[in-house]
Structures are given as structure tokens and as C-alpha cells.
Image (cartoon, coloured by chain):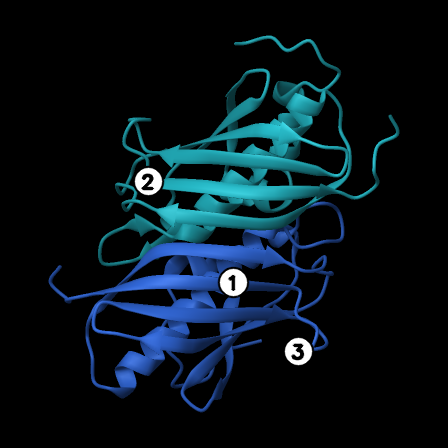
Amino acid sequence: MSGLPDSPTLPPYAQAMGMVVDQLEGTTPILAMDFADHVQGRPGYLHGGAISGLLEMAGFAALRAHLDAEDSDRALKPINVSIQFLRGGKSQTTYAAGRIHRVGRRNGHVLVEAWQDDRENPIASAVMNILIAPAED
Amino acid sequence: MATTPSFFDPSKAAVLLQHGHSGWLGTEYLDHGPNWVELALPWQEKLVGQPETGIIASGPIIAMMDMATALSAWTKRGKFVGQATLDLRVDYTRPARPQHTVIGRGECYKLTKSAAFVRGIAHDGDPDDPVAHVAGVFMTLQVPRA
């Protein structure tokens, strides 16, 4: 699985985890992460931390894409995240995408979902509050 | 190292940390008490979330805290029971300093038959100046018989 040619650059952690931009939905990137031993928790299942990492990257990517569309170069910093684990992540590719619920001058509020074979039945969801800081901050 | 009068010894269960995602992250067992477990996450280039600053991504910190709090629940319960993370909330109080090992201390403050309530902090040297606070709940997969 490879990223789209013009997809946003993901940080080292996301690349090392095997996350790629699978497709763009409007401006929102849908991230994908293949199953492998390095994302496994109990045998045959995704580690909750790996799911969390994917959710957060998708949340940041959604807000970044939204701000880029407005020509912004501001830095994004996590304030907090609340993750709900809805079902076990099986040994297959996992997708995640964020929806921007509100963007103010100082912070963004993003809902993120992760799913496997059925997007209507997500395996996990997250609510993220992200600080939008001036680029030099 | 603190001793715990139980059949679950997190220092031995920490062998789990060498496998799968925890092994890839490089998490290590540090210490434990009757209801808490401390793990370490050494800084690594591949864990960086901001290349321009070298600051570690939040995902590895969540993963470590998930593991530290899960181990704290088994430690307090005194035995291993299958459990799944129901939810986890993380407040990022400040960025972890680049090149610094992040230490995660998970604590189980309440057990019921079907749930374990946990909280914890992550810090990079000074426990009084955490990089993150977490709170969460684990559900037991099978209710243990009384």
C-alpha cells in the first residue's frame, strides 16, 4: 500500500507505524494502516495504543487539511483526546478519518473514527481538542 | 522494588512488553506497588511526531499508559483476567522534551467485578511536572466468579 502522490507528509512515527494516506475525501485524508506484528496487542488483535495513534494522526491530518485550505501555516498541538474502544481491532487493514466539528482562532474540535471492513461499525472513535498556535509559537 | 502479596507479578508479566506493539515501542518495566505500575518509554527517532522539534508523538505515550494502567488493574486484582480498554482520556499538559525517556505511572483506584477504573501520569524526569494525565476504564471480558 502506498500513499497518494500529492498526499500530506506524515511524521516519522506515522510512517514507521505503516500509516499512509489511502485517499482524500474532499480535502480530508483517510489514513490506512496495515496489520503487522508491530501494531499487535493480544495475539491476533490490534493494540489499543496503535489504534489511538492512528486516530490521532487522522484527527491532526483532518485539521491540517482544513487549515491548509485556508492558507494557514499555524502549528497544531494536542490539548486532549478521549478515545472510545468499541470493538476489538482484527488482523486486517484499519482506516481512520476525522471530521471537523468546530474550528476557532485558538483551537479545533475534531471527531475521528477508525474502522475496518464496515465504516458504519467503527472499531474506535475519538474526540480531540487541538490547539492552533501561531507558527513561531 | 515493592512487593505485592498477589499471584500477579507485573515485573514478570512485563515480558509481555517485549512483544508486538509494546516491543516495537521499546517500553520497559520500571517498578510497581500494590495498585500501580511504572513503565519507561525511551526516546527513539521513529517515535517522533514533529520532525522540526524532535518531540515524540502522542500515540506512543497513549500506548504506554494503556499498558501501565492495564498492568496496574491486574496487579490490584491479584490475578490476570481478560480485559479490554473501554475508554481512555489523555490531557497533554506539555510536550515531552526531545531525547528524554518518558516514564508512565498507571494506577488502579477502583475495581469492581466487571470494571477497573484507572488513572495515571506520564513525565520526562519530574513526576511533579507531568507531560500527560490519563484516566480510563477497562472492562473484564468475563466477570470473575466471586
Same-subunit check for callouts 3 and 2: no
> Residue sitting at 75 percent across and 47 percent down?
A43
Categorize mark 1 by other alpha carbons within 10 Å: few (<14), some (14-19), many (20+). many
Task: Identify residue type, mark 1.
Answer: Ala
Identify the subunit bearing mark 2.
B
Task: Identify residue type, mark 2.
Answer: Val
Q: Is residue B38 above or below residue B41?
A: above
Name the image quarter holding residue B2: top right
Name the image quarter holding residue B124: top left
Identify the subunit bearing mark 3.
A
Badge 3 marks a residue whose secondary structure is loop
Instruction: Kindly identify which residue carries mark 1.
Output: A126
Categorize mark 3 by other alpha carbons within 10 Å: few (<14), some (14-19), many (20+). few
Label number found at residue B131: 2
CA gap, disc 2 to disc 1? 20 Å
> Residue sitting at 50 percent across and 72 percent down?
A20
Instruction: Kindly identify which residue carries mark 3.
Output: A119
Q: Colour of chain A?
A: blue
Quarter of the figure that contains the N terminus of chain A: bottom right
| Left or right: A109, with B111 as reference point | left
Which of the chains is cyan? B
- Between tags 3 and 1, which lies in front? 1
Give the residue at the far right of this rendering. Answer: B145
Name the image quarter holding residue A8: bottom left
| Left or right: A132, with B47 as reference point | left
Image x and y of residue B110, in percent: 62, 29
